[in-house]
Image (cartoon, helix red, strand yellow):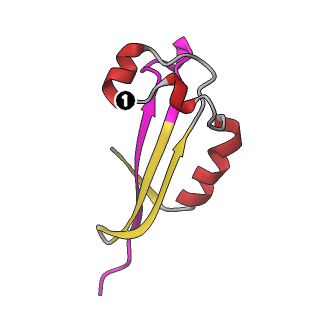
């Protein structure tokens, strides 16, 4: 008998790589899997980083300043992410 294993596969997009330079998360994407199969439960959040997204970052992920201008800021959505992952293991892509 195998135990059910629920994991959250997590991917993020950012304004850049160095938080000490003020770079921030602009997208959180999650897929819940159970025993390595998608459950159908997902979460996708776009976030206003309250700073410009450099053009080299936009070239990687395609997210523009204009697209996130009306999105919520991180402090308004992080609890949605915490609630989604619960006590599941996280697999970061």
> Which residue has dot 1 on it?
62
Crowding at label 1, few (<14), some or many (≥20) Cα neighbours within 10 Å?
few
Instruction: Give the vertical position of 31 relative to 73 (above or below).
Output: below
Q: Which of 42 and 10 is in front in this view?
A: 42
The residue shown at (54%, 62%) is 87
Indicate whether 43 appears above or below 5.
Answer: above
Residue displayed at 70% across by 37% down: 75
Helix, strand or loop at mark 1: loop
Tell me where residue 2 appears, x and y as whole percent. 30, 82
- Please report the residue visible at 48 percent of the width from the left and 43 percent of the height from the top: 28
Q: Which residues fall within the magenta stretch? A: 1-26
Residue 55 image position (x, y, % from top left): 40, 14
Is 11 magenta? The answer is yes
Give the quarter of the figure containing the N terminus. bottom left
Residue that lies at the very extreme toward the right in this rendered image: 76
Q: Position of residue 25 (x, y in %)?
A: 52, 31
Q: Viewer-proximal residue, 2 or 23? A: 23
């Amino acid at each position: 008998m195998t135990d059910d294993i629920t994991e959250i596969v997590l991917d993020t997009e950012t304004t850049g790589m160095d938080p000490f330079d003020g770079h921030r998360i602009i997208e959180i994407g999650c897929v819940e899997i159970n025993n390595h199969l998608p459950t159908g439960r997902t979460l996708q959040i776009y976030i206003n980083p309250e700073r410009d997204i450099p053009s080299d970052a936009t070239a990687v992920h395609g997210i523009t300043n204009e697209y996130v201008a009306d999105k919520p800021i991180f402090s308004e959505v992080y609890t949605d992410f915490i609630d989604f992952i619960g006590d599941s293991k996280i697999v970061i892509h």
